[in-house]
Image (cartoon, rainbow, N blue to C red):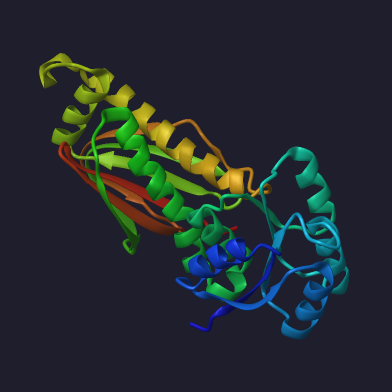
Amino acid sequence: MEKVKVMVVDDSKVSCMILEDIISRTNFEICAFAANTTEAIEKYREMRPTVVTMDMNLPDHDGIECSRRIHAMDPDAKIVMISAMRDASLMAKGQEAGISAFLQKPINENELIDTLMLLCQNKVGTIVVLRESYAKPFSRAFQQGLFSLSGVHSEAELTQEEGRYLEVNGIAVILGITGKPRGRAILYMDASTMQKFSRVVLGRKSDAEVSKKEIGEAVEEAANIIVGHGVSTINDIFQDREMRVTPPGTLYGENIRIANPKLISFKISAATRLGTIYMNIGFAGGE
């Protein structure tokens, strides 16, 4: 795939080096560096980058004024503010100046890549954007949530789900996702794993001490927490996503088939000492 052009506006050599290191390992490439507003305007006009990263503090003008001038020249400009500050007033002024997203220093590599992917989705493709900017944050939330709930470490694998149906034997908790993009998350596991997982989450000594009702409640709560954390991560990065989680629905049984209608779906498999725990996360075409 053709590299997507990024212009970095920052007068700090250290910040530029950090951004260059991160971006060099992605489908993006830095086409220009600018240390002040005058230089940024000139290089933007010359290079026409797909996206700009913008520092707040520049020698001649602040990053908001620089962004305003770039946006006046190109109303479709995509600008990411990267600053030590990230308060409501700054973001409100930045949005008025045409800034699309806000990240805080020290920069988080995953947040930066997720942000660039989303802003440049027409260049990188819908499936890549959904995988990198949405499925991967959910995968990280999945691993973190499993550890915080049960104390178990996991090795997570993320793959695209191709089948028309999701086959489940054991338990499946289904949660809707509203906002942009809308979609659906399903946390599921087999009967043996759900018994062990619920026992550990509830702090019981044996599987026999956990009732079916308690199993359902424990797995439902786990699904709520994990999906909620994934949604919150995305909302923190992108101020206009407004993603929310709907109340869960739970299914038990053998040979359960859950349809996967018109969703671009990803399967996250987390191998743990309790068994493999799965999450299916699907999105309606990124809209």
| Rendered residue at 43%/47% (across/down) | 138
Regarding residue 285, the answer to whether it shows in the image is no
Q: Quadrant of residue 86?
A: top right
| Rendered residue at 69%/64% (across/down) | 10
Q: Is residue 116 left or right of residue 239?
A: left
| Rendered residue at 63%/64% (across/down) | 119
Q: In which quarter of the image is residue 261?
A: bottom left
Q: Is residue 263 left or right of residue 258?
A: right
The location of residue 108, given as percent across then percent down, is 52, 52
Q: In this view, does 173 lie to the left or right of 116?
A: left
Q: In this view, does 123 lie to the left or right of 260?
A: right
Q: Quadrant of residue 260?
A: bottom left
Q: Quadrant of the C terminus?
A: bottom right
The location of residue 227, given as percent across then percent down, is 44, 39
| Rendered residue at 76%/77% (across/down) | 44
- State whether residue 104 is above or below residue 174: below
- Front-most of residues 65 and 149: 65
- Count the marks: how many? 0
- Front-most of residues 282 and 85: 85
- State whether residue 199 is above or below residue 18: above
